[in-house]
Image (spheres, rainbow, N blue to C red):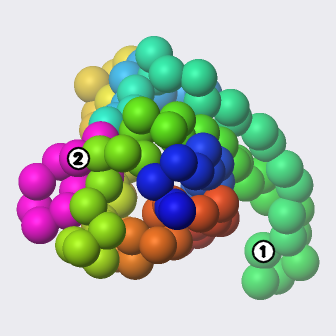
């Protein structure tokens, strides 16, 4: 039932993905990469204004990643746990890797908003 889904994952972050020259969003199960999305894929980036704990306006960014039916077929529902990681490279040569984001595979195969803090 889930495998034919075409979910869109939304990652909300303080980093501006438009400043990255390369990036990869990796989905892994049992420590093996199942799927990778890169800057070459159709990924939408939106900017929003939010307020920090002091009430000051700050920009936040949302990356929307749509998984195709072919993408979702790569996930094993028996594995249950999926880990997502975002890695990027700036033009300066600096790089960044998020912490691993643990997600139940059922949530990966449904539309989700995933917040990286």
**In the image shown, does 47 or 76 lie closer to the viewer?**
76
Residue at 46%, 54% in the rendered image: 3
Q: CA distance from mark 1 to mark 2?
A: 35 Å
Image quadrant assignment for residue 87: top left
Residue 99 is at least partly visible in this image: no
Answer whether labels 1 and 2 touch (C-beta < 8 Å). no
Left or right, residue 87 beside residue 33: right
Q: Name the residue tied to disc 1.
A: 52
Q: Main secondary structure of the magenta part?
A: strand
Residue at 59%, 63% in the rendered image: 110
Vertical relation: 28 (above or below) 54:
above
Vertical relation: 68 (above or below) 12:
above
**In the image shown, does 61 or 90 lie closer to the viewer?**
61
Residue at 77%, 52% in the rendered image: 59
Vertical relation: 30 (above or below) 12:
below
Residue 94 is at least partly visible in this image: yes
Residue at 40%, 27% in the rendered image: 38
Vertical relation: 91 (above or below) 8:
above
**Residue 3 among magenta residues:** no
x and y percentages locating residue 73 in the rendered image? 36, 45
- Count how many numbered circles sit on residues in the image: 2
x and y percentages locating residue 112 in the rendered image? 63, 64
* Range shown magenta: 25-35
Image quadrant assignment for residue 14: bottom right
Disc number for residue 64: none
Image quadrant assignment for residue 105: bottom left
Left or right, residue 95 beside residue 11: left
Left or right, residue 114 beside residue 99: right
Q: Name the residue tied to disc 2.
A: 34
Left or right, residue 36 beside residue 50: left
Q: Residues within 10 Å of mark 1 (few under 14, many from 20)?
A: few
């Amino acid at each position: 039932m889930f495998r034919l889904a075409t979910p869109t994952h939304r990652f909300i972050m303080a980093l501006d993905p438009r400043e990255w020259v390369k990036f990869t969003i990796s989905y892994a199960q049992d420590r093996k990469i199942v799927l990778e999305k890169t800057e070459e894929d159709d990924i939408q980036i939106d900017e929003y204004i939010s307020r920090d704990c002091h009430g000051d306006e700050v920009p936040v960014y949302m990356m929307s990643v749509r998984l195709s039916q072919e993408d979702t077929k790569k996930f094993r529902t028996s594995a249950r746990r999926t880990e997502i990681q975002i890695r990027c490279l700036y033009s300066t040569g600096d790089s960044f890797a998020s912490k691993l984001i643990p997600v139940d595979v059922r949530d990966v195969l449904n539309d989700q908003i995933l917040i990286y803090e």
